[in-house]
Amino acid sequence: MKTKLFSFIFALIFVIQLYAESTGNIPLRNFSKPLIAVVLLVWLYLATKLKGRFHKRIFTGLIFALAGDVFLMLQTSRPGFFTYGLVAFLLCHVYYIRAFILDHKSNPNLKNSFFLWAVGALIIFCVGLFFYLQPFLGAMQFAVLIYAIIITFMAIMAVNRYGKVNIFSYKLILYGALFFLLSDSALAVNKFAQPIPQAGVLIMATYMLAQFLIVYGTVERKLIITKTEI
């Protein structure tokens, strides 16, 4: 029941946010954007009661995501807020990584055949994107590099959950991590390299899907073998 209710509420916010982005309705965008993380925080809390460390770490990551959303929302009038937003989302990814590490520790000796291929593809994507952006970054080179490494590692740890949790949770969080990677890549290209048509719609659509899928996967998570606390 909670999943259906919060999925419906989130779908409404999703549509409102994309409408605001596509029409340039700033007041509506500023109203709906913070609700993205707020609704997910309430859903996660009610569905899990934050009983496990995994739940607590995803919840904390979402709080930083909420702060990041607000900072990026206000960067038009305060350009320095972009850096604050970058730091907030960096911390969001760090907490997601810390959550995914718990699943690795539940069965650390389990291997999967496609892990190295996935890691290689993600690293190639990260390196290629960074070198594409590098001529445009200026003083932001180091910050963007660190961010790219962290979000790529987050996606790698999402891949690493295979066989350690139920497949439904695994797929949800993996797709969420990949959508997050796509969203942040589009944001970086649009901000630093070249404008993307309807960039706001693309960035927010992939971002909202990412956060929704990660929270949904957290709610549905079940460890296959428990060698660590949940």
Image: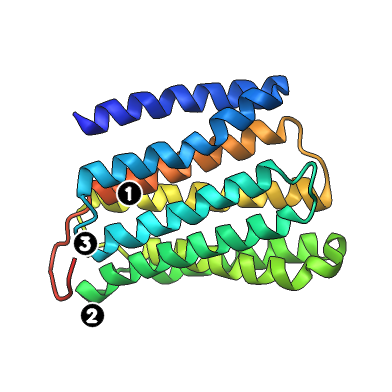
Element marked by disc 3 = loop
Residue 171's label in the rendered image is 1
Residue at (51, 48) in percent of width and height: 66
Using the numbered discs, state the Cα–Cα distance from disc 3 to disc 2 in whole angstroms: 22 Å
Residue 83: image quadrant is bottom right
Q: Amino acid at mark 1?
A: Lys
Residue at (74, 73) in percent of width and height: 142
Element marked by disc 2 = loop
Question: Do labels 3 and 2 touch, CB within 8 Å?
Answer: no
Element marked by disc 1 = helix
- Please say whether residue 118 is visible from this viewpoint: no
- Please say whether residue 190 is visible from this viewpoint: yes
Give neighbour class at mark 2: few <14, some 14-19, many 20+ (Cα, 10 Å): few
Give neighbour class at mark 1: few <14, some 14-19, many 20+ (Cα, 10 Å): some
Residue 46: image quadrant is top left
The mark that comes first in sequence, 1 or 2, is 2
- Name the residue that disc number 2 marks: 109
Q: Position of residue 125 (x, y in %)?
A: 62, 61
Question: Do labels 1 and 3 touch, CB within 8 Å?
Answer: no
Using the numbered discs, state the Cα–Cα distance from disc 1 to disc 3 in whole angstroms: 20 Å
Residue 52's label in the rendered image is 3
**Camera-nearest residue between 208 and 135:** 208
Q: Is residue 79 left or right of residue 152?
A: right
Query: What is the residue that sits farthest to the bottom in this orientation?
Result: 109
Residue 58's label in the rendered image is none
Is the C terminus in the top left, top right, bottom left or bottom right quadrant? bottom left
